[in-house]
Image (cartoon, rainbow, N blue to C red):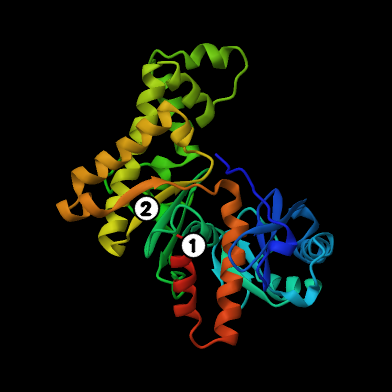
Amino acid sequence: MASQREFVRVEDGLPPFYVGVDLGGTTVKLGLVDDRGLTIAWDSIDTEVQTGPEDASRRIGEAVRRLIQTARVEPSAVARVGLGSPGTLDIPAGIMINPMNFPGWGAFPIRDRVAEHSGLPVAFVNDASAAAYGEFWVGSGREFQSMILLTLGTGVGCGIIIGNLIIEGEHGFGTECGHIVIDFGDNARMCPCGHSGHLEAYASANAVIKRTQEALDSGRPSSLLQRLAHGATLSPLLVAEEAEAGDELADQIVMDTACYLGVGIVTLVHTIDPSGVLLGGAMTFGVRDSKLGRRFLRRVQQEFRRRTFPVLAEKTKIDFATLGGDAGYLGAAGIARLEHEKATCPDAGRQLTRDREALV
C-alpha cells in the first residue's frame, strides 16, 4: 500500500537538493528531494521501453530539468541525480546487464546518458537497493542500523543496508535474495530464472497465482471458482479478497506464502544479522490496514521465530515497509546524497549517521 505523499515548500526545504529517479518497466517516477529526504516536487513519465534506451535517457533528462524548473529551485542548488534501475547492473560501468524486461537496453551507458541529458552527475543503483535505502533513510527503517527489505511483487526483490553501506556484490548479484534456495528436493518448484527451489518460486505474485491454480485444478473447493467463472482474473488481490471473505483455500495460500517468507528470512538473518527486516512491494495483502495483512505478518514472524535462535527471535524486528511506491525515488535521491557527500566531505558517512539520528 503506497504511503500518502507529502510535500514541503521549496522555501522550507534544506539544500542541497537531489532528484531521485525510479525506472520501471511501465513508468518512471521522479522526485525532487531536499537534504533531509523531504519531497519538494514529484512527477512521472511513461517508460516506453520499445523506443529504446537513448530516447528514454533523453526524456528522463528532460523530466529532471522540468521538475527542477517547475519547483522553482535554482539549478545550482541541485547537487546530483540518483537513478534506480531494475535488474542486474554493472554499477561502475553504469549499465544494465541483459535486462529481461528491457530488450535492447543491455550494455547501454544509461547512467552517463541520463547525466548528459540532465546536466547533472548521476548515482546509479539497483531499484530494490534504492527502495531499501529509502526506507532506511526516511521510512520505517530509520530506527535500524542495518536492515533487509524484501519487495514482494511479480518477483521477490531485495535490498540490504549495513550502516551506510549498500550491498551490491562483486558482480552485481549481491542482493538477489529472491533466488536463495529454500527447497532442494527433487520436486522443488521451478523459478522463472530456470533454477529450482528459489524463494521467488514460492513467495512471489506469480508463485501465488501458480500455486492457487494448481490447487483449483486438483479439485479443491473454493469461492475463487465462482469469481473466475464470472470473469475475474486470478491474481494475488483476488486471492486476498476471498481470503478476507473466509475462503479456506485462499487463506491457506496466503498463510503458506508467509511461511515460505519466514523460512527465507531465517537464512538472510543468519547471514546478515540485521536490526530488522521489512516487507514491501505490491503483494503485502493490505499491510496493517487489513486483518489479513496483520495475520500474514504474524505468520511470517512466527515461522521466523520457530526456526531461528532465541536471541534473534527476540531482537530482530520484522515489519511492513511504509513508503510504498515512493521508496524507490526517495532512496535513489538518498544514494545521490551519499555520493555527493563522499565527493565533498571526508566525514560524510559519520555526518549522515548523525543526520539520521536527528530525524528519528
Judge by depth and name the residue closer to the eye, 129 or 107: 129
Query: Marks 1/2: CA distance?
Result: 20 Å
Residue at label 2?
277
Judge by depth and name the residue closer to the eye, 325 or 13: 13
Task: Label 2, secondary structure: give it.
Answer: strand
- The amino acid type found where label 2 is placed reads Val
- The amino acid type found where label 1 is placed reads Leu
Give the residue drawn at x 56%, y 69%.
335
Residue at label 1?
359
In this rendering, the answer to whether 84 lies above or below 194 is below
In this rendering, the answer to whether 141 lies above or below 187 is below
Question: Where's the N terminus, which quadrant?
Answer: top right
Expressed as whole percent of the image width and height from the top left, the position of residue 71 reads 80, 60
What is the crowding at mark 1: few (fewer than 14 residues within 10 Å), some, or many (at least 20)? few
What is the crowding at mark 2: few (fewer than 14 residues within 10 Å), some, or many (at least 20)? many
Expressed as whole percent of the image width and height from the top left, the position of residue 226 reads 52, 11
